[in-house]
Image: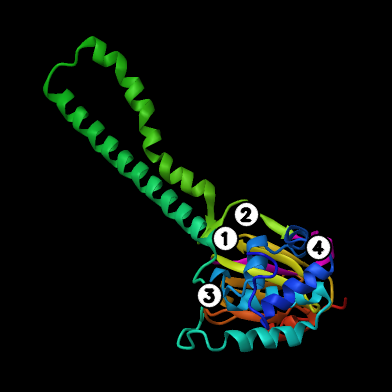
């Protein structure tokens, strides 16, 4: 859509106008804010259907407004007002149900599961086929050339267990991936750790709305929160994000699978919330 095509008087037009007045393109802003270019374009086009969900859209609006020198909280309130009338019967009114990245990841996990089940089924078939051949050998004399091949058959037997061995090399605990990636600050510069115990989209921003982290985490993956004041967490599923403070558990970001929005990541507050002792900063 051209820069002057947005409906007059909309928030999208104001965001686009502010960006153009700064002489910046969407690609530059996307790199600075760590927000996908198509999501920024959707904000400017007032196309909420192309955004991943209400909590994330609000986070993107706050970050974009702060970057452009607008008032973040006023801009967020205006955005909420503009979307209030869109499908009020839906909790995720007007937004996509799931980020595109997560849809692709979900499909990948399903495909992986199908492959594993197929390998296990083949292993079971090979096991019973081998047993059947053994029974036949006890009835009829075994030719010498068959006797020479028996060691090769025995060598194949451990391979029947390879699917399970493969799973164990990937999974180290219930729902936790082995060698899972940990993002964010070095351990020495972080007191708060976010770890996914279920697939969820995680967004971390500062009080000005700037984005520090914006990514879908799979079970076992984590993010070390930098030691800074005024950081906030938005999570697609609150009960899918486990928090630790100085290595001690602080529970999950939420008690249900509903989204957790703008949760303070202050170490002292989280330590009190969990009942864990608070170590001085």
Marks 2,1: beta carbons within 8 A: yes
Name above or below for residue 10 compared with residue 165: below
| Residue in the picture at 84% in, 62% down | 188
Residue annotated with mark 2: 180
Q: Is residue 136 visible?
A: yes
* Rendered image quadrant of residue 240: bottom right
Mark in the foreground, 1 or 3: 3
Region in magenta:
184-198
Name above or below for residue 127 compared with residue 60: above
Task: Locate residue 259 relative to residue 25 in the image: left or right.
Answer: left
Mark in the foreground, 2 or 3: 3
| Crowd tier of the residue under label 3, counting other residues whose Cα lies within 10 Å: few below 14, some 14–19, many 20 or above | many
Q: Earlier in the sequence, mark 3 or mark 4?
A: 4
Could you say which disc has been placed on residue 218 in the image? 1
Mark in the foreground, 2 or 4: 4
Residue annotated with mark 4: 24
Task: Locate residue 45 relative to residue 245 in the image: left or right.
Answer: left
Position in image of residue 97 (x %, y %): 49, 71
């Amino acid at each position: 859509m051209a820069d002057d095509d947005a409906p007059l008087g909309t928030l999208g037009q104001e965001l686009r106008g502010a960006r153009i007045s700064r002489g910046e393109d969407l690609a530059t802003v996307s790199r600075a804010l760590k927000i996908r270019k198509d999501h920024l374009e959707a904000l400017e086009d007032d196309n909420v259907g192309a955004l991943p969900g209400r909590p994330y859209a609000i986070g993107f609006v706050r970050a974009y407004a702060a970057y452009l020198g607008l008032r973040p909280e006023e801009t967020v309130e205006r955005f909420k007002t503009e979307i209030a009338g869109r499908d009020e019967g839906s909790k995720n009114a007007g937004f996509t149900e799931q980020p595109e990245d997560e849809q692709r990841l979900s499909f990948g996990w399903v495909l992986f599961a199908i492959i594993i089940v197929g390998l296990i089924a083949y292993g079971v078939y090979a096991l019973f086929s081998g047993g059947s051949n053994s029974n036949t050998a006890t009835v009829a004399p075994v030719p010498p050339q068959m006797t020479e091949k028996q060691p090769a058959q025995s060598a194949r037997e451990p391979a029947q267990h390879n699917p399970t061995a493969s799973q164990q090399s990937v999974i180290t605990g219930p729902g936790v991936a082995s060698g899972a990636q940990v993002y964010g600050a070095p351990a020495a510069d972080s007191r708060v750790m976010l770890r996914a115990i279920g697939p969820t989209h995680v967004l971390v921003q500062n009080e000005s709305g700037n984005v520090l982290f914006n990514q879908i985490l799979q079970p076992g993956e984590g993010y070390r929160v930098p030691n800074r004041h005024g950081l906030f967490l938005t999570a697609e599923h609150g009960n899918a994000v486990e928090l630790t403070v100085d290595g001690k558990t602080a529970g999950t970001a939420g008690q249900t699978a509903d989204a957790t929005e703008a949760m303070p990541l202050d170490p002292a507050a989280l330590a009190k919330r969990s009942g864990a002792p608070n170590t001085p900063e």
